[in-house]
Image (cartoon, grey):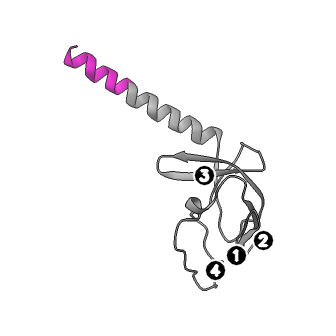
Amino acid sequence: MSTKLILALGVVALLAYVAVSYGLKQRFPRVEVAADTALKGRVSGVVHMQGSYSFFLNGQTTTRYDFDAFAPAPGQAPFRRDSSLNQYLHVGDSINKRPHSGALTVRRGQRLSR
């Protein structure tokens, strides 16, 4: 193969990668779960794209939720987080979060975590 052909194929592959990534982000918008966000539902799917995790809730695939942005409400003391919430959550977990709350409750089977 000639150098020009290899370079052209590399450019086409790069453009295809960028187009697919952009298309997926547009098709499945991502919501960063923050203190003001209210949520209640069951994790029904996980998407791992470009080093970040997003979750679908209640079988709905129109919106992805990112829990790594979760932080206490303004004025509340920061909480200790041993690991990323995105790494902790699994399909089947039930999530409950009141608006303006620094607490997120996760139920996995009989186990309840806050």
Question: Which residue is identified by label 4?
Answer: 74
Which image quadrant: the N terminus?
top left
Residue at figure coordinates x 65%, y 63% from the top left: 33
- Residue, far top: 1
- The circle drawn on residue 24 is none
Residue 10 among magenta residues: yes
Residue 55 at x, y percent in the picture: 65, 52
Answer with mark 4 or mark 1, whichever residue precedes in sequence: 4
- Res. 18 image quadrant: top left
**Magenta-highlighted residues:** 1-12
Of the residues tagged 3 and 4, which is closer to the observer?
A: 3
Answer with mark 1 or mark 3, whichever residue precedes in sequence: 3
Question: Which residue is identified by label 2?
Answer: 98
Residue type, mark 2 in image: Arg
Packing grade of label 4 (10 A; few <14, some 14-19, many >=20) is few
- Spatial distance from mark 2 to mark 1, Cα to Cα? 8 Å
Cβ atoms under marks 2 and 1 closer than 8 Å: yes
Answer with mark 2 or mark 4, whichever residue precedes in sequence: 4
Answer with mark 3 or mark 4, whichever residue precedes in sequence: 3
- Spatial distance from mark 4 to mark 1, Cα to Cα? 13 Å
Residue 93 at x, y percent in the picture: 72, 59
- Res. 35 image quadrant: bottom right
Cβ atoms under marks 4 and 1 closer than 8 Å: no
Question: Which residue is identified by label 1?
Answer: 103
Question: Which residue is identified by label 3?
Answer: 54
Secondary structure category for the residue under label 1? loop
Residue 104 at x, y percent in the picture: 70, 71
Residue type, mark 3 in image: Ser
